[in-house]
Image: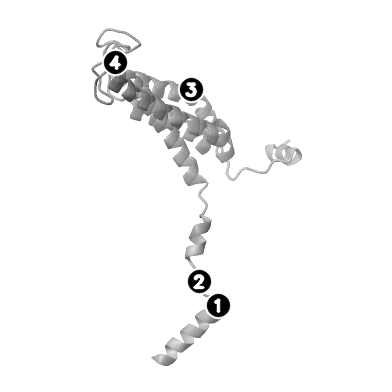
Amino acid sequence: MAEGQRQAEKGEKEPDFKTSLVIRTVTRLMLPFLIMFGLNIIVHGHLTPGGGFQGGVVVGAAFILIGLAFNKEEGRRAAPDEGVKVVISSGLFIYILVGLIGICAGYNFLANRCISFPPFGELGELFGGGTLFWINIGVGLAVCGVAIGLFYAFLEEKRDAAYYKKIKRPDTKRRLRDRVSKDIAE
């Protein structure tokens, strides 16, 4: 039985587009590696090239790939709006909290002078970056959520009702009358 017939029996609608089996299979195989690679970039951002922004984009691109390889509904199931908002909010919360802890410790906002900031570690080790470790995590979460949110916002773009209120086109009779009067005036 074809997949379209199974969907029709279940009452599901046909997806807008369908990609090839190869693309869907490669996406399923690569998805965990993309997410792990992005998390690795975020976590090691204070030691190696990369950081929160770059890692957040890679993790966000992994979730965007679901929407591209399968369809918009599958992508929305993998990254629902509420989850995206929680990821963005938690990233911003971590970022601001680290800055406020620096202020409470007597330094500037987001100053990395508190090397003994938890988790403790030696300088040059994974947990030895002080506040940079936590800043990268906050930035990575926020960027990941914003990338996913922007992609699906552009994908599902609809004109706002205010847009239609601004543009008031005259009806057809008025346009014809204006055109005739313009021709007579010339």
Query: Is 55 situated above or below 179?
Result: above
Q: Which residue is mark 3?
A: 32
Circles 3 and 1: CB atoms closer than 8 Å: no
Marks 2/1: CA distance? 9 Å
Mark 4, residues whose alpha carbon is within 10 Å: few (<14), some, or many (≥20)?
A: many
| Crowd around label 1: few <14 · some 14–19 · many ≥20 (10 Å) | few
Q: Please tell me which residue lies in front, 152 or 65.
A: 152
Amino acid carrying label 1: it is Thr
First-in-chain label (4 vs 3)? 3
- Identify the residue at horizontal 42%, vertical 31% (top origin): 144
Distance of mark 1 from mark 4, alpha carbons? 68 Å
Q: Is residue 103 above or below residue 9?
A: above
Which tag, 1 or 4, sits closer to the chain's start? 4
Mark sitting earlier along the chain (2/3): 3
Q: Tell whether 186 sits left or right of 48.
A: right
Query: Which residue occupies 28% across, 17% down?
Result: 105
Q: Amino acid at mark 2?
A: Arg
| Secondary element at tag 2 | loop
Is the Cβ of the residue at disc 2 closer than 8 Å to that at disc 3? no
Q: Residue at x 38, y 23 (%)?
A: 137
- Quadrant where the N terminus sits is top right
The residue to which callout 1 is attached is 172
Secondary structure at badge 4 equals: loop
Disc 2 vs disc 1: which is toward the camera? 2
Estimate the spatial distance between the alpha carbons at disc 3 and disc 1, rounded to whole Å: 57 Å
Does label 3 or label 1 sit earlier along the sequence?
A: 3
Kindly identify which numbered label has been placed on residue 110: none
- Residue placed at 30% from the left, 18% from the top? 131
Sequence-wise, the earlier of marks 2 and 4 is 4
